[in-house]
Amino acid sequence: MKLPRATEVNPEATGRPRRPALALTLQCGDGIDGTPFAHAQIRRWVLAALTAPATLTLRFIEREESRRLNCEYRGQDHATNVLTFGYSVDPTIADVLICVPVVVDEAAAQGKTFKDHLAHLVVHGVLHAQGWALVAMCSGQLVFSQGRGGRAIQQKFRSSEP
């Protein structure tokens, strides 16, 4: 009997679902000296929220870039924690911008670690990139919905998962 090579093993046969294909680029804006965590860690957070193949750029930015883009595209003259610019949902193509100083401030104010809050916001941005919209807060969890009358999910995520 010929045994299958490792590359021929069906992931469903192992009980693990196949992960969607992901092309991920990390960028740092002016004033940001390197990504806050390793590419592999950030990729795991992205994959935790990904439901279909995607091409994503995660850009870590300072307050001024966040404020400028938030003002220009959302009409709000302040820096924000995450901005998602989706160009296509099927396949998912998007830029997710995360303002590092705002994430640091929010984590401290909420009694969270920077890592946990950043993981939460990466997942949050990736969900938006796939067409999910934030619809409610329920028992401390964010509730996202996809499309009108579509299914809803609750986002409860910590950096230790997965």
Image (spheres, grey):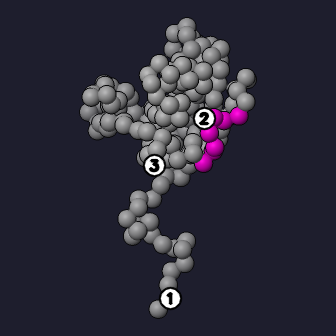
Q: Secondary structure at mark 2?
A: strand
Residue drawn where x is 53% and y is 52% of the image: 21
> What residue is shown at x 56% (from left), y 14% (from top)?
79
**Can you tell which mark lies on residue 58?**
2
State yes or no: residue 36 in magenta: yes
Q: Which residue is mark 3?
A: 162
Q: Amino acid at mark 1?
A: Lys
User: On the picture, is 82 further left or further right than 35?
Assistant: left
User: Is residue 55 placed above or below 72 in the rendered structure?
Assistant: below
Percent across and percent down for residue 20 are 49, 52
**Helix, strand or loop status at disc 1:** loop
> Please, what is the three-letter code of the amino acid marked with disc 3?
Pro
Question: What's under tag 2, amino acid-wise?
Answer: Leu
Task: Say which residue label 1 marks.
Answer: 2
Magenta: main secondary structure equals: loop
In this orientation, does residue 52 appear?
no
